[in-house]
Image (cartoon, rainbow, N blue to C red):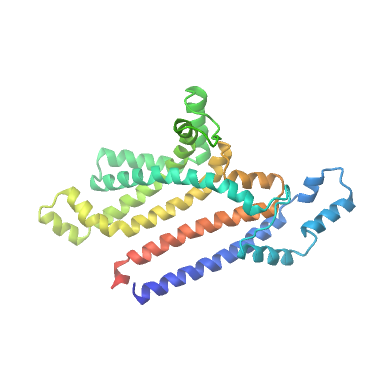
Amino acid sequence: MNSTIARLIVNRLGIGVLTLFIVSIVVFTITSLLPGDAAQEMLGQSATPETLAALRAEFGLDQPVYIRYIDWLGGLLVGDPGTSLVNGMPITELIGGRLPASLKLAAAATLVSVPVALFIGIFSAMYRGSAFDRYSNMFAVFSVSVPEFLIATIAVLIFAVKLGWLSALSHISDDASFSEMVRAYAMPVLTLCCVLVAQMARMTRAAVIDQLSSPYVEMAMLKGASSIRIVLLHALPNAIGPIANAIALSLSYLLGGVIIVESIFNYPGIATLMLNSVTTRDMPLVQACAMLFCFGYLILVLIADICEIVSNPRLRK
C-alpha cells in the first residue's frame, strides 16, 4: 500500500467519524422533538403532576437537551447507551438479545443473494443482448421498482394464505429443526433477496462489460481465447474492485429492508425492537437502535469506498 492509498483511506475514515458525529446530533435532536412522554406512557393517564415530575427527574428528562445529549454521547463512546425507560433493563442487554436474530437474517440473505447476483451479472455480460440478458434486465428493473412491503405482502398472500406452504410469521423456537428454520426464513429472505439480487446483478454486469471493452480483452480475443477464459482470467480479476464496491453498497440496503421485513413478518430482530420502542416512547432505546443502523450503514459504505480506492490501478502505481 503506497502513501496515496493510505492517505485516501485515512481521509475516508475521518469523514466517516465526522459523519457519525453529525448523525448522532440529528438522531438525538429528532427523537427529542418527537411527541409523547415516556413517563406519561409508563404511569398512565391517572398519574399526578408530582409523580410525573419525580419520574422525569429520575430519568433525567427534566435536564436541558444539550446536557442530555452530552451524557448520552459520552455513554455511547464507552459502550453504554443507557437504560430503557419502559422496563428498566440495560439497552445493551436488550439489543444483545435481538441483534443475533437480525444478523442471522442478514447473513442468510447475503449467502443467497451474492452468488445468484454474481452469476446473473457475469452471465448477462458474457451474453449481452441474449434472451437471458433481456429477461434478467426485466427482472432487475421490476424488482428495484417494486417496494419491499408489496413483495412481502404478495409472498404472504401466495405462499401462506393460498398455498399454505409457509408460515406468515417468522418466529421460531431455539430448538427448531432445519426444516422449520427454512420455512420460517424463506419469505423474509426471499423478500430481501429480490432487490439485493437486482441491484448487485446490474452493477456486476456493468463492471464486467466495462472490462470486456478494454484493449487487453480485445487482444485476448484476437489470440483466440474462449469467452469463458476471457471473462474468468482477464475481465473478472480487474472487475473485482467495482464488484466488491457494488456488493458493499447493495448490502447496505439490508439495513433499511430489514426494518420493513421484520415488521411485516413479526421477526424478533433489532428492527422490531426499535419499532416497539417508538410505540412506547422509549427514546433511549430508539436512539441506540437508530445509531446502530447508521453505524452499520456507514461501515458498509466505508468498505465500499476502500474497495474502490484499493482496486484503482492508477492509485496502485
Q: Which is nearer the eye, 244 or 268?
A: 268
On the image, the x and y values in percent for residue 158 come to 48, 27
Q: Is residue 132 above or below residue 38?
A: above
Q: Tell me, yes or no, if residue 270 can be seen here.
A: no
Please state if 312 lies on the left or on the right of 190 as rendered: left
Q: Which is nearer the eye, 128 or 119?
A: 119
Q: Which is nearer the eye, 253 or 177?
A: 177
- Residue at left 34%, top 75%? 2
On the image, the x and y values in percent for residue 139 come to 37, 39
Q: Is residue 75 above or below residue 38?
A: below
Please state if 87 lies on the left or on the right of 121 as rendered: right
- Residue at left 26%, top 55%? 236
On the image, the x and y values in percent for residue 200 come to 38, 49
The N terminus: image quadrant: bottom left
The C terminus: image quadrant: bottom left
- Residue at left 43%, top 40%? 194
Please state if 175 lies on the left or on the right of 280 as rendered: left
Q: Which is nearer the eye, 88 or 125?
A: 88
Q: Tell me, yes or no, if residue 16 can be seen here.
A: yes
Find the residue positioned furthest to the front.
Answer: 175
On the image, the x and y values in percent for residue 284 come to 68, 55
- Residue at left 43%, top 42%? 193
Find the residue positioned furthest to the bottom.
Answer: 3
Tally the marks.
Answer: 0
